[in-house]
Image: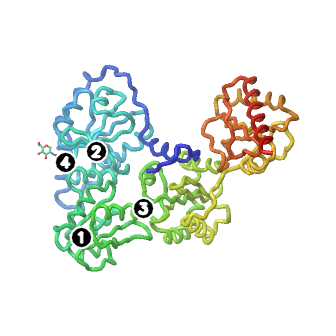
Amino acid sequence: MFRPKPTSRFIYFSLTILLLLGFFTSILASDPITNENGDEDSEDIEELLALDEEVEQEEESGSGSSSSSSVRYSEAEVLSKAQRIVLELNGDNTKRVIDDNEFVLVLGYAPWCPRSAELMPQFAEAATLLKDLRSPLLMTKLDADRYPKAASLLQIKGFPTLLLFVNGSSQAYTGGFSAEEIVIWARKKTGVPVIRINLVTEAEEFLKKYHTFVIGFFEKFEGSDYEEFVKAATADNELQFIEVSNIGVAKVLFPQMKATNNFLGIVKSEPERYTAYEGTTFETEKLLQFFDYNKFPLVTKLTEINSARVYSSPIKLQVIVFAGEDDFEKILGPLQDVARKFKSKIMFMYIDITDENLAKPFLTLYGLEESKNTVVTAFDNKISAKFLLEADLTPTNIQDFCSRLLHGTLAPYFKSQPIPDIKDATIQSIVGKTFDALVLNSPKNVLLEVFTPWCINCETTTKQVEKLAKHFKGSDLIFGRFDAATNEHPKLQVSDYPTLLLYRAGEKANPIKLSTKSSLKDLAGSINKHLKARDKVARDEL
Ligand SMILES: *[C@@H]1O[C@H](CO)[C@@H](O)[C@H](O)[C@H]1NC(C)=O
């Protein structure tokens, strides 16, 4: 993960973290109110499980005669079936269900929580798929708002929370959030890390269901290479692994595969479909690294569901394209061509510019939150720098931008408001672009007020600065204001607002931070003291 310097004012790190946490951060109603609903809930787990059995038997007898004439369930039926497969936990049954089952996956949710609502259908679909796969995993959900005691027993602290209980002890969920990803993760953690495919027909069926997977080809399913492969399959949290020992079957899944003793490759559903592992040895760590660098598509569409996964990539250089869907479709082809050249070095992402939640926090970093046109940005998360492609969005310019990002020769972007017209106000408005000229390179002493429009105490300080400006009018101290929400400068590292900085002539590299809590009189006194001291040093040097 990122390790920003604590002094860094690049707020996108906090934004990243926010995005990351956003998915699971929420507040659990903490008052341990007594469970009023316990008595009404006469449904018992055995009854529910029995119901599941009935449903299953009905299905089996229904589809038993011929697979082509199998019963067609309506969508509503499928959904209600999926919901029945997910066992509802409550104040009475929770402890028993957790204690009596080897594998239980619990979804802790709250009815009012939109992220829970988003996850629920994926979870229900995963439950259906797992049931069809005869997984031993019991899928359950707990309304943590309604049953706070049960929630605290399971240590559910936010919504939505997924927890896996294995023989009663819990494990954090580390998989993805689509039905497919939940199934893959659940099977890995319940003893089926790899699917074995023996027949061409099985391979063809598999291709219909899975978009991204890892294939291991082994003459025999034994030996150290194979063991490392299985370890990697278990350690990985999101990819479906398959193993094959028949070369004909393997070629259905990975056509360019060269017949060697052991082979490993990753398959994705996009132009860059097949990537073979080229390492000479199969070691779990190396295999996992190979997956980390190769599992993402050439250009990944960022969504709330995959953002945590995307941010955990070891690739620390990112190029993000913000565009409307139609605009993006037009540049996707050329963009993929560029992405191919920087494969496993730069992560290419697309964010729908109309998606307020995802796009705005990023665009705000560039002062472009109102933009409707395509924007191409980049981040170097090793050095906490952000970049903006300001040239025309031609493939050549995009490629050049990426190449300079990779070689560390791009100039970082600092946002700035346009240079204001008014020059001789008592208090000058200083923007990113004029900070050098008006503060650092100015021969004058400068008192700079750094503020943001949203900061709580800024107004009080602004009033004080106005009075100070009048008081010092005609002296060699000039006053400036810097709106840190819309302006940045590499040499201005301020993290709390308001901040008052006194830049003394000839000492511009070391501004003095003045207390914003001081009275007006103390502030004026302190300014005088610092300026006099400066004058004295200057005289002594003569
Ligand atoms: C759970 O407990 C049972 C009975 O003690 C045991 O046979 C089984 O291996 C345990 N499962 C896991 C995954 O540890």
Residue drawn at (60%, 67%), measured in percent from left and top?
398
| Residue, disc 2 | 81
Residue drawn at (86%, 33%), measured in percent from left and top?
473
Q: Is mark 1 in CB contact (under 8 Å) with mark 2?
A: no
Measuring from the top left, give residue 385's x and y in whole percent.
57, 54
- In depth, the one of 87 and 412 nearer the eye is 412
| Residue, disc 1 | 201
Precedes in sequence: disc 4 or disc 3? 4
Q: Secondary structure at mark 1?
A: helix
Image region (quadrant) for ligand 1? top left
| Residue, disc 4 | 136
Q: Amino acid at mark 4?
A: Pro
- In the depicted structure, whether residue 392 falls above or below residue 167: below
Measuring from the top left, give residue 179's x and y in whole percent.
34, 51
Q: Secondary structure at mark 4?
A: loop
Precedes in sequence: disc 1 or disc 3? 1
| Residue, disc 3 | 296
Q: CA distance from mark 1 to mark 3?
A: 28 Å
Q: CA distance from mark 2 to mark 3?
A: 33 Å
Q: CA distance from mark 4 to mark 3?
A: 30 Å
Residue drawn at (53%, 48%), measured in percent from left and top?
358
Q: Amino acid at mark 1?
A: Thr
